[in-house]
Structures are given as structure tokens and as C-alpha cells.
Image (cartoon, rainbow, N blue to C red):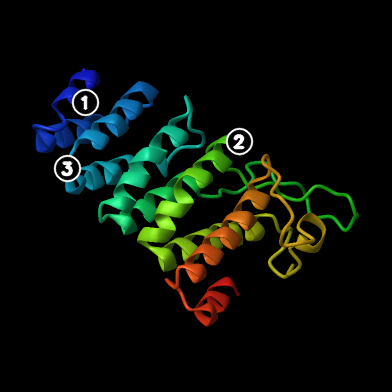
Amino acid sequence: ESRYLIAAAAEAPEAVIKVFTTIAETENPTIHHDLVSAAMRMPIKHAARLAAVEMQWIRKQEQLMLHLPYETGPLIVRMAAEGAGDQAVTMTRALLGVRPDPSPPEPSDELFARHPEPRVLMDGWEYGELLDRVIVPLVTAAPIATVKMLVSLLRDHFELSKWHAEQDDDGSNAWRARLDQPADKTEVRDLLAFAVQDAATRAVAAEAIPLGDAVILLR
């Protein structure tokens, strides 16, 4: 039983990783909650390995249920704080990844026609809560990788919102007219734009990234 694996995680991390690896493809959400809980009790090198097992499963999902993304936040924070910053960034990327609209509309020249709507693994509220929880630890642990990851997510969202490859206007002058404009907590696009700005600002302020390098990353 996966609850037993949580109890055994601190004393027998190798055995627990082996068992979870064999059952990680299950669609039972309780198993995945318990996997994250077990990783929180392991030494960090083992926790990062178990997180990698979970990432493989996450990348195959269309939706994550039972608040799993939010509950994974503490594991990401722990990895960032304990020397596994790159793995923490990678896990965040897996959770926040942007996917194509499963039913894209036909291209149109009409002003108010619907654009393709990229999908993510959770609702907008959970997406924003996860970002809020992990941004500061990630920027502290891996500033360049974090900014690059967030920029790539925002770029993915833009690319998947296009009707055609030649489209180069992201419409941000309409949906984010000012840099100090608060993010719409239900819109992934807004949340990512704010996160990019926040992460880059924090990294430059901490002198973790020179201002010129930050400008290049944001282009």
C-alpha cells in the first residue's frame, strides 16, 4: 500500500523508489499524492530521483486532479532549497507545460473570432497558486534557468494561440497594456507574463543576472 511507502521513505528510500517506479503509470491519483509525500521524507538526492519518475507520468496527462499540482509545490521548493535547483525547474516546467487546443477553430480574419486556446494541466487558480509558491525559491536557486523556463512557457502559449505560423502580433498591447497591470488570476497567459516579469526583476535585483543578460533572455 502506498501509504506504507510514505512511512518507509526516510529509512529505505531506494526500496521505495523501486516500488513507486513500478506503479507510477497508474491513473489512481492517491498513488501520486503518496509519491509526492514520500519524496518529501527522503534525502534530497533520492527525492529528486523520485520526482523524475513522477515527471514522466505528468508529461503524459491531459489534466491533473485533486490539487496534485499545488501539493507538489513544497517538493519543488525543497529541491530548490537543497541543491536540486535544476530538477526543481524541470519539474515546474512539466507541471506548467502548455499544450495545443484539442479543438482549434478554423483560421479567420474576423476581428472577434476565437483564437486557438492552449490548454494546461490545471485551472487558472491552481496555476497561479503554484507559480506564487515556487517563483522565489526557483529564482534563488537557479535564476537563469527559471527565467528561461518561464519565457519558454509564455512563448509556447503565444505560438499555440496563433492561427498560422506567420502571425507575429501577440496582442499584448490589449491584454497587458501596462507592466504594472495586475495579472488576471484566471488567465494562464496573464499569469505567465507576470511571472516572467517578476522572476527577471528579482534575479536582476539580487544581482544573479546582469541587466543586459536579462534583456537578452526576455527578447
| Amino acid of disc 1 | Ile
Can you tell which quarter of the image residue 46 is in? top left
Q: Which residue is mark 2?
A: 125
Which mark is first along the chain, 1 or 3?
1
Q: Which mark is residue 6?
A: 1
Residue sticking out furthest to the right: 111
Q: Which mark is residue 54?
A: none
Whether residue 123 is visible? no
How far apart are the two marked residues, 3 and 2, measured between alpha carbons?
31 Å
Q: In the picture shown, does residue 153 fall above or below 168?
A: above
| Amino acid of disc 3 | Pro
Whether residue 209 is visible? yes
| Secondary structure at numbered mark 2 | helix
| Secondary structure at numbered mark 3 | loop
Which mark is first along the chain, 2 or 1?
1
Q: Which residue is mark 3?
A: 43
How far apart are the two marked residues, 3 and 1, measured between alpha carbons?
13 Å
Q: In the picture shown, does residue 71 fall above or below 156?
A: above
Residue at 82% x, 58% y is 174
Q: Is residue 170 left or right of residue 90?
A: right
How far apart are the two marked residues, 1 and 2, measured between alpha carbons?
28 Å
Which mark is first along the chain, 2 or 3?
3
Viewer-proximal residue, 175 or 109?
175
Residue at 42% x, 65% y is 143
